[in-house]
Image (tube, coloured by chain):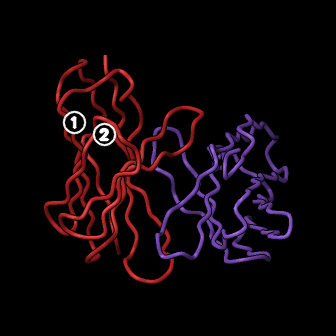
Amino acid sequence: QKEVEQDPGPLSVPEGAIVSLNCTYSNSAFQYFMWYRQYSRKGPELLMYTYSSGNKEDGRFTAQVDKSSKYISLFIRDSQPSDSATYLCAMSALDGANNLFFGTGTRLTVIP
Amino acid sequence: SQTIHQWPATLVQPVGSPLSLECTVEGTSNPNLYWYRQAAGRGLQLLFYSVGIGQISSEVPQNLSASRPQDRQFILSSKKLLLSDSGFYLCAWSAAGGLFETQYFGPGTRLLVL
């Protein structure tokens, strides 16, 4: 079993829709959770990061962490064509090794 | 602010040829540096990381090697490329110290081995 599981999609939604992207994980030691956005042929760009459980909001983006279920989500409200990209979840334990464990990414297309 | 550069952006090399990819970071000192490979549908695979000049840790045994000749320079090399080395190579940096620091990625190098 992989440490981080992410549905690869692809996911297509109409412009303005609410998008839900999810990852599950198996290692209960993970405490930092990140979402990266990667446009085609570019490096991943950090979108948001959260520590432990709870919600974090930044503009149209909301990150949720449920440690009891080992489940994290990224919600995108009022999705735009410019949101079309691959979204990668990543997570790490607070063990000083600074190792990141990535999901395989979900490819999102927002149709105008 | 910090900036991370990678070059070349794209590279096409024959099997058996050598490889040298370069990564430099500006605007920070003593960063942790990382090399990842991203293959289609397989996510990011950590290849090497470095916490200081000359200090390299290898995560995956293979025909690749890494070096850190200067504080903010990280080089990925191979003496003889294999077909399986094709992929998207990403360099990343994070601040040193603390239990965890977020990693920031460069623009990547797309390598095609023919």
Chain appearing in red on the rendered image: B
- Which of the pair A56/B94 is nearer the observer? B94
Mark nearest the camera among 1 and 2 is 1
Residue underneath mark 1: B78
x and y percentages locating residue B109 in the rendered image: 34, 40
Note whether A48 is above or below B68 in the view shown.
below
x and y percentages locating residue A62 in the rendered image: 76, 67
Chain appearing in purple on the rendered image: A
| Residues at marks 1 and 2 touching, judged by CB atoms closer than 8 Å | no
Q: Residue at x 74, y 36 (%)?
A: A9
**Separation of residues labelled 1 and 2 (CA atoms):** 17 Å
Residue underneath mark 2: B9
Q: Split into 4 quadrants, where in the image is the C terminus of chain A?
A: top right
Q: Residue at x 32, y 58 (%)?
A: B57
Circle 1 SS class? strand
- Give the residue type that dot 2 points to: Ala
- Which of the pair A10/B18 is nearer the observer? B18
x and y percentages locating residue A39 in the rendered image: 54, 44
The chain containing the residue under callout 1 comes to: B
- Which of the pair A64/A103 is nearer the observer? A103
- Give the residue type that dot 1 points to: Ser
Labels 1 and 2 share a subunit: yes
Q: Residue at x 71, y 50 (%)?
A: A80
Note whether B90 is above or below B101 in the view shown.
above
In this picture, residue A19 sits left or right of residue B43:
right
Q: Quadrant of residue A30?
A: bottom right
In this picture, residue A79 sits left or right of residue A102:
right
